[in-house]
């Protein structure tokens, strides 16, 4: 009964269902797993049935006094895995040390680039809570590049190697494969927050 | 001299994993940035002639050992415009004494000079590129090996 309901209901886990307009947030909690990585659970109600989502785990509140929440893996079902700032910071660390991500004569990301990228990521509230699009983190010529992409919009945060070369945010709106709008903006937390919100609306 | 003036595919060697996603078979914009390194307060420009391309996948292997090879239609490259200079991109062949199979895409600025235009053009080029297949990659590498043996 529970399984069948969950699977049939899981099909409703489209981004639209999880959009803020339809979401009845009963609670949002963060907790560490066995490896110390932080996860955020978002809880919402649909047809008065409470649900929660952690990555690809859908949880259902079972109407029994002794079992409050039961988790069922819904891999293969369209869910919205969230990536938070800790996840991105881990990617920054990985991109900083990996030799496979740069040419032999290319310098690694500078300490300044890494520090400023982490600071920005930590200061964006939507990333702390968890963002529905996973970021790609790549080094280039001593800089750190963090890219979020949807089918019609891209946002790139470029943290340059030194304070002498201003870091920036590049964004573009696509029609097909062509960018019809593109601009750069200062790399500031409030600007990145606004730009990620702009990106989010295109993919809901 | 213009390379591939009548159009046709050109190939770009990709030297590191930041420039492509093998799993998704996607070319990243980083594949089309001009390399530069900051030495003290000065940017040392590594690609002064432009973005290197070749007329065949095998020709890519003559100069480097790439991790992957991207291909793109030369007519598309020429359709792109550098908004700052007002000029379209072009592909010039290396001087014949050097290698007629290679050329450089010009009118792409360095990121340190014009980040907006560099990001835009790199994105357009990457989205309209595709990776050659594993089989074609191996064949091109073997072509290069047999060519070197004959030489």
Image (cartoon, rainbow, N blue to C red):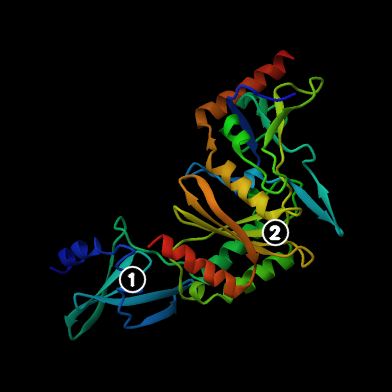
The residue sitting at the front extreme is B86
- Pinpoint residue A177: horizontal percent, then vertical percent: 49, 44
On screen, residue B46 above or below A24: above
Between label 1 and label 2, give the one nearer the viewer.
2
In this rendering, would A50 be left or right of B36? left
- Name the residue tied to disc 2: A143
Q: Give the label on residue A53, or none.
A: 1
Q: SS of the residue at dot 2?
A: strand
- Report which quarter residue B32 is drawn in: top right
Instruction: State which quarter of the image contains the C terminus of chain B.
Output: top right
On screen, residue B7 above or below A61: above
Q: SS of the residue at dot 1?
A: strand
- Pinpoint residue B82: horizontal percent, then vertical percent: 67, 44
Q: Nearer the viewer, residue B133 or B75?
A: B75
Q: Residue at position x 35%, y 83% from top? A: A27
- Pinpoint residue A17: horizontal percent, then vertical percent: 29, 68
């Amino acid at each position: 009964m529970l399984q069948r309901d969950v699977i049939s209901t899981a099909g409703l886990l489209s981004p639209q269902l999880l959009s803020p307009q339809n979401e009845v947030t009963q609670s949002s909690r963060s907790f560490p797993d066995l490896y110390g990585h932080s996860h955020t659970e978002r809880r919402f109600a649909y047809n008065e049935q409470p649900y929660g989502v952690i990555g690809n785990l859908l949880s259902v509140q079972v109407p029994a006094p002794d079992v409050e929440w039961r988790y069922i893996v819904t891999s293969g079902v369209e869910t919205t895995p969230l990536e938070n700032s800790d996840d991105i910071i881990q990617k920054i660390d990985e991109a900083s040390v990996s030799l496979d991500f740069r040419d032999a004569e290319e310098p690694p990301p500078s300490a300044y680039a890494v520090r400023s990228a982490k600071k920005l990521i930590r200061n964006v509230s939507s990333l702390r809570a968890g963002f529905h699009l996973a970021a790609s983190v790549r080094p280039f010529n001593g800089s750190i590049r963090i890219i979020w992409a949807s089918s019609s919009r891209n946002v790139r945060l470029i943290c340059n190697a030194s304070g002498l070369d201003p870091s920036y945010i590049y964004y573009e709106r696509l029609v097909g494969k062509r960018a019809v709008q593109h601009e750069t903006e200062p790399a500031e937390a409030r600007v990145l927050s606004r730009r990620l919100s702009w990106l989010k609306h295109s993919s809901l | 001299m213009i390379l591939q003036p009548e159009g046709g595919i050109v190939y770009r060697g990709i030297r590191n994993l930041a420039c492509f996603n093998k799993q998704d078979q996607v070319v990243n914009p980083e594949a089309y940035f001009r390399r530069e390194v900051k030495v003290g307060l000065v940017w040392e420009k590594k690609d002064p002639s432009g973005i290197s391309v070749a007329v065949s996948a095998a020709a890519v292997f003559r100069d480097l050992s790439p991790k992957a090879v991207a291909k793109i239609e030369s007519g598309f490259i020429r359709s792109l415009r550098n908004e700052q200079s007002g000029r379209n991109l072009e592909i010039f062949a290396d001087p014949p004494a050097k290698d007629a199979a290679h050329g450089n895409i010009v009118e792409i600025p360095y990121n340190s000079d014009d980040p907006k235009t560099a990001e835009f053009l790199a994105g357009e080029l990457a989205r309209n590129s595709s990776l050659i297949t594993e089989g074609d990659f191996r064949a091109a590498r073997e072509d290069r090996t047999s060519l070197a043996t004959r030489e």
